[in-house]
């Protein structure tokens, strides 16, 4: 349904290198184990600006296990865990 | 129509109501303060356990306007109890209260893309809207240029640029509100139905925002590079955590150091007032009620006002700078080890001053299980009311020696240990709760890290004033009534003729204490302690005053503590003192906390569960401490 086709080799925000700019190509909450009702995580992410076309970049990584991550999303910064960052499909630019 | 009739009509007409809505961190509260100044209060909705911030102002057009400050949200699809308030007020879902006449959407001009999405959602409701384009000064500095006229045309709502922290653009906003209210009164459009937007709708809103920005955003400006550089340090795994602990350390130092002088002032004032009342009234029940009951009782709580204000000063400044969100980020993984959300950090931190505001701060946690777990452990954080008890017992039983090569005093070390035991047991209880009662995956973390900002002294001052007002109102109502009841329990029936023991011995509280004594004997408590624990239920620190009464002392304040310490040292064994300290780490105490737990969880069950688990822990801890200490000391 996205007008930003996923590149070959499905890359997720969770595995993006710190400092590597990218844009969001899709939100796929199926990749995340959650107790939330279906569609809820996807909607929350969209509400935080994580929507197809958003420019993103991992700015900072937490501790321990480089988790959570601080992600630049267009003009603002969102903190999230790597577990949920698996739901965000990205294309590095 | 006479002037009198006109003013009666004016008073009869409902004043227009406006509500401030916006994302968190958009400067909404600063705008609320700029509009209302100190003409604001926190009120309760009748019948529901919800608080709202209400103020009023006089518009240039002569209208007396009521303003509601709503909790920040990214969407009307409320996820936390805080956000539910926003949704229900905006949609007019509260009984006896219509939807506000005008919605003032507050948007951070430096982050329009995210902020406008909520505006689009609100616009669908069909209510009159005014958009306050806030933080224009920061936007200008970053070279972000917005064409307000084009934005207004594209959005279809009036747009007013503001700089709320410096009260800039307020006049323009007021004028616009007057114009909008005039029209809104002429033909107020009905509230359109609202249903939860689907992910498809949300994407459509974003596309709408992109189209609007394409027409009105001339230059997006530079990203906040300063914030990034600071974050590179403050979110650094090692340096960042070190800095966080340094901040916390300084905060606790300040809570004790800065509050000392005002606390002794308050103490002096209470003693003086007590003396004056005692001198003015004849000896009798009324004098006893006023001095022993009300002034001493309420005074013993009011004395914590300075500590609570210092703590909230720090929390407010840290929040306004944007650092609290970083603290939640830094601690998310560590707190996740016991299953807590990073956001639980703020309620738990507040609980060091007092569990009541701490438990109320848990409202920002979205998930009910996470929120309940946080509420249940909040009272294990050592609140400032435990301090007088700790201070008294430490002064009586812990020798004032230097340890660790003369670097640290032993009393300070014991105090530190008591705090640490509280924190560790809170984490343990959370760990157990999250693996049993509140099972399930953790709520996802999706939290904005706002750009750093210099807090405005005015906003900090208004926030602190509000805190002081709430605290004193509580002391004047709940605590006041409890003190009267306790005074009654401790005073009636009076001592018989020729009694040798202090009067409290013969009172209802004394009987209760004697009845409890056999139950408390296994943990080393004598009947005097048992009696003191009864009034201690009202507020922990009252136990000190009660011990003073039992040991028939007449001094108050510092004199009481120092002379009582000597008496206790002679009367109690060290195992009893240690058991009492252990008891106080866990004791389910202070009715105010229990009342707020009932209110915030909206359930008697969780309040009862808290009493049960904490009483059990307190008894077990005191038992083990007493037995182990007795065995080791050969007692």
Image (tube, coloured by chain):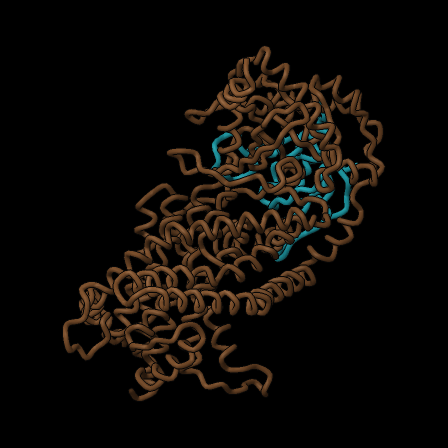
Chain colours: A cyan, B brown
Q: Residue at x 41, y 38 (%)?
A: B49
Tell whether B547 sits left or right of B67: left
Q: Residue at x 32, y 78 (%)?
A: B576
The image shows residue B35, relative to residue B318, as above or below, that is above
Quarter location, residue B515: bottom left
Tell whether B379 sits left or right of B579: right
Q: Nearer the viewer, residue B474 or B355?
A: B474
Residue closest to the far left:
B497
The image shows residue B87, relative to residue B571, as above or below, that is above
Q: Residue at x 70, y 29 (%)?
A: B132
List x then y, in percent, for residue B382.
Answer: 46, 64
Split into 4 quadrants, where in the image is the N terminus of chain B?
top right
Q: Nearer the viewer, residue B284 or B339?
A: B284
Tell whether B465 sits left or right of B560: right
Q: Residue at x 36, y 59 (%)?
A: B294
List x then y, in percent, for residue B252.
Answer: 57, 65
List x then y, in percent, for residue A61.
Answer: 68, 52
The image shows residue B542, relative to residue B354, as above or below, that is below
List x then y, in percent, for residue B428.
Answer: 43, 60
Report how many numbered discs are placed on residues in the image. Answer: 0
* Residue B435 in view of the camera: yes
* Residue B112 in view of the camera: no
Quarter location, residue B242: bottom right
The image shows residue B258, relative to residue B370, as above or below, that is below
Split into 4 quadrants, where in the image is the C terminus of chain B?
bottom left
Residue closest to the far front:
B2
Residue closest to the far top:
B187
Quarter location, residue B565: bottom left
């Amino acid at each position: 349904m996205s007008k930003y086709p996923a590149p070959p080799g499905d890359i997720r925000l969770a595995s993006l290198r710190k400092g590597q700019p990218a844009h969001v190509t899709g939100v796929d909450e199926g990749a995340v184990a959650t107790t939330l009702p279906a569609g809820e995580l996807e909607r929350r992410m969209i509400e935080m600006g994580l929507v197809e076309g958003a420019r993103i970049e991992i700015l900072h990584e937490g501790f321990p296990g480089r988790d959570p991550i601080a992600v630049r999303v267009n003009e603002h910064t969102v903190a999230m865990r790597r577990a949920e960052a698996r739901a965000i499909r990205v294309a590095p630019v | 129509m006479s002037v009198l009739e006109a003013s009666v009509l004016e008073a009869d007409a409902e004043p227009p109501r406006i509500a401030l809505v916006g994302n968190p961190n958009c400067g909404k509260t600063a705008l609320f303060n700029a509009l209302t100044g100190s003409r604001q209060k926190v009120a309760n909705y009748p019948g529901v356990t919800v608080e709202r911030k209400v103020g009023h102002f006089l518009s240039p057009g002569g209208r007396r306007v009521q303003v509601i400050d709503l909790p920040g949200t990214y969407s009307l699809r409320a996820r936390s109890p805080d956000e539910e308030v926003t949704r229900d007020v905006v949609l007019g879902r509260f009984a006896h209260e219509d939807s506000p006449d005008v919605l003032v959407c507050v948007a951070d001009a430096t982050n329009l893309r995210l902020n406008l999405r909520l505006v689009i959602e609100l616009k669908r409701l069909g209510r009159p809207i005014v958009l306050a384009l806030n933080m224009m000064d920061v936007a200008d500095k970053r070279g972000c240029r917005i064409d307000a006229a084009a934005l207004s045309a594209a959005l279809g709502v009036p747009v007013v640029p503001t700089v709320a922290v410096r009260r800039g653009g307020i006049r323009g906003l007021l004028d616009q509100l007057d114009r909008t209210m005039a029209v809104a009164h002429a033909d107020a459009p009905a509230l359109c139905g609202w249903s939860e937007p689907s992910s498809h709708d949300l994407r459509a809103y974003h596309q709408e925002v992109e189209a609007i920005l394409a027409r009105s955003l001339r230059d997006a400006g530079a990203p906040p590079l300063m914030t990034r550089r600071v974050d590179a340090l403050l979110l650094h795994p090692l340096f960042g955590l070190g800095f966080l602990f340094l901040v916390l350390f300084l905060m606790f130092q300040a809570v004790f150091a800065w509050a000392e002088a005002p606390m002794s002032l308050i103490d002096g004032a209470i003693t003086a007032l007590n003396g004056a009342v005692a001198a003015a009234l004849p000896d009798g029940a009324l004098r006893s009620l006023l001095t022993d009951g009300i002034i001493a009782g309420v005074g013993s709580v009011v004395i914590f006002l300075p500590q609570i204000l210092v703590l909230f000063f720090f929390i407010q400044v840290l929040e306004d700078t944007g650092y609290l969100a970083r603290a939640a980020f830094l601690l998310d993984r560590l707190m996740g080890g016991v299953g807590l959300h990073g956001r639980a950090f703020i309620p738990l931190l507040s609980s060091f001053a007092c569990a009541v505001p701490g438990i109320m701060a848990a409202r920002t946690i979205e998930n009910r299980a996470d929120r309940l777990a946080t509420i249940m452990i909040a009272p294990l954080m050592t609140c400032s009311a435990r301090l007088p008890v700790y201070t008294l017992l430490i002064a009586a039983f812990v020798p004032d020696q230097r340890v660790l090569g003369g670097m640290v005093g032993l009393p300070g070390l014991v105090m530190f240990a008591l705090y640490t035991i509280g924190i560790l047991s809170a984490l343990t209880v959370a760990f157990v709760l999250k693996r049993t009662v509140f099972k399930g995956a953790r709520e996802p973390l999706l939290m904005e890290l706002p750009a750093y900002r210099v807090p405005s002294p005015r906003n900090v001052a208004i926030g602190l004033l509000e805190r002081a007002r709430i605290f004193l109102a509580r002391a004047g109502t709940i605590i006041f009534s409890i003190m009267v009841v306790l005074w009654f329990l401790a005073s009636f029936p009076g001592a018989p003729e020729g009694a040798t023991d202090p009067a409290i011995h013969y009172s209802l509280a004394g009987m209760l204490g004697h009845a409890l004594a056999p139950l408390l004997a296994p943990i080393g408590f004598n009947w005097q302690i048992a009696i003191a624990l009864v009034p201690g239920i009202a507020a922990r620190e009252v136990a000190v005053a009660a011990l003073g009464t039992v040991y028939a002392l007449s001094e108050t304040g510092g004199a009481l503590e120092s002379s009582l310490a000597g008496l206790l040292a002679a009367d109690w064994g060290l195992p009893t003192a240690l058991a009492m300290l252990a008891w106080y780490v866990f004791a389910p105490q202070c009715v105010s906390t229990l009342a707020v737990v009932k209110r915030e969880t909206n359930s008697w069950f969780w309040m009862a569960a808290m009493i049960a688990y904490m009483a059990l822990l307190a008894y077990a801890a005191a038992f083990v401490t007493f037995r182990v200490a007795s065995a080791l000391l050969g007692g």
